[in-house]
């Protein structure tokens, strides 16, 4: 849940929707250190931790739409597991993917794990639905959650857990990705958001490959050169062909507002990436 640039706060960010311009309403910040900031324009509500990074973004008139391109790419997990029944998410933020899944996957049980209570306290500002039989928000450590929750608990696991310092150390270790794989049911899919300028990105990729082997693929995020999405799956099946993914995208089109065909193209593009281009692991 982070798209950032090395410029002071402006009404535009990498991947920010084109209609984001307009007067900024005075930001709302919680009192504690590392607390989130809410910034509003006439068309958007955004969640940030500082002047350099946007964590989440919501259309005022379309709160369930995926406003940021990287979230639309992450929705590509549907091309690998079209009808998940159990979805776990590490990192709530403004709830973009949580709201999308809640609306478009009515048969899914969704659990969102967020470590920062100040973020959870903003759920009404971002029109995140209340807890019910299908949706639960837990205030907990995501790494500890997957370590302790047991085996084969989720069909899809989404990891997008950034704070003011970037990706927490606990969400990029070999143990964490091994726990993620164990947490998935057979055939389950992991989707991870990484930043290519994170000094630890090579370590994260190496740890993920250790856990999933060849059952993993990269996808450059839509509208952002900084976000890199990684998909991994708990099976020995190869990555579906572009033709197969496009067929799945077309079959799902009537039930989804996101362009899954675009996600398919990005997954196919990422399949040609050399993982080593992102550097050598520091702890190798």
Image (tube, rainbow, N blue to C red):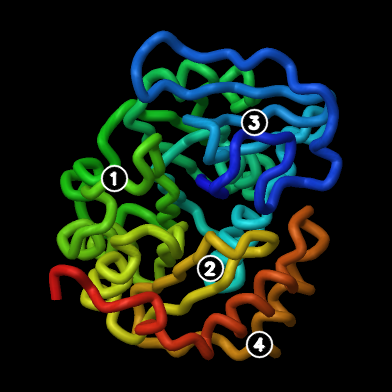
| Residue positioned 53% across, 68% down in the render | 81
Mark 2 or 4: the one toward you = 4
List the residue tagged with mark 3: 46
The circle on residue 81 is 2
In the image, residue 70 lies at what x, y percent?
61, 57
List the residue tagged with mark 1: 168
The circle on residue 242 is 4
Mark 3 or 2: the one toward you = 3
Q: Is residue 248 something that shows in the picture? A: yes
Earlier along the polypeptide chain: callout 3 or callout 1? 3
Q: What secondary structure is found at the residue carrying circle 1?
A: loop
User: Could you tell whether 141 is left or right of 89 in the image?
Assistant: left
Screen quadrant of the C terminus: bottom left
| Residue positioned 49% across, 86% down in the render | 273
User: Could you tell whether 196 is left or right of 185 in the image?
Assistant: right
Residue neighbourhood size for the residue with mark 4, other residues' Cα within 10 Å, grouped as few (<14), some (14–19), many (≥20): some
Marks 3 and 1 sit apart, C-alpha to C-alpha, by 21 Å
Marks 1 and 4 sit apart, C-alpha to C-alpha, by 33 Å
Mark 1 or 4: the one toward you = 1
In the image, residue 141 lies at what x, y percent?
26, 36
| Residue positioned 35% across, 84% down in the render | 276
Q: What secondary structure is found at the residue carrying circle 4?
A: helix
Earlier along the polypeptide chain: callout 2 or callout 4? 2
Q: Is residue 11 above or below residue 129?
A: below
Q: Residue 123 is drawn in which quadrant? A: top right
């Amino acid at each position: 849940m982070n798209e950032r640039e090395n410029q002071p706060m402006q009404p535009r960010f990498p991947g920010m929707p084109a209609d984001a311009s307009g007067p900024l309403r005075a930001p709302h910040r919680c009192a504690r250190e590392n607390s989130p900031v809410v910034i509003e324009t006439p068309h958007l509500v955004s969640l940030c931790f500082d002047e350099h990074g946007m964590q989440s973004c919501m259309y005022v008139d379309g709160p369930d739409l995926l406003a940021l391109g990287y979230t639309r790419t992450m929705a590509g997990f549907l091309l690998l597991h079209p009808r998940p029944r159990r979805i776990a998410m590490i990192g709530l933020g403004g709830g973009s993917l949580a709201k999308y899944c809640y609306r478009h996957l009515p048969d899914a049980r969704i659990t969102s794990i967020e470590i920062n209570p100040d973020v959870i306290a903003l759920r009404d500002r971002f029109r995140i639905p209340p807890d019910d039989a299908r949706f639960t928000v837990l205030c907990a450590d995501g790494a500890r959650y997957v370590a302790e929750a047991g085996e084969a608990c989720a069909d899809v696991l989404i990891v997008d857990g950034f704070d003011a310092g970037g990706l927490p150390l606990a969400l990029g270790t070999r143990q964490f990705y091994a726990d993620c794989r164990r947490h998935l049911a057979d055939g389950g899919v992991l989707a991870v958001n990484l930043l290519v300028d994170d000094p630890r990105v090579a370590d994260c990729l190496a740890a993920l490959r250790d856990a999933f082997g060849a059952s993993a693929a990269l996808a450059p995020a839509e509208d952002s050169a900084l976000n890199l999405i990684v998909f991994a799956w708990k099976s020995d099946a190869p990555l579906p062909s572009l033709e197969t993914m496009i067929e799945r995208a077309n079959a799902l089109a009537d039930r989804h507002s996101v362009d899954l065909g675009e996600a398919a193209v990005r997954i196919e593009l990422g399949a040609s990436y050399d993982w080593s281009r992102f550097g050598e692991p520091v702890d190798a």
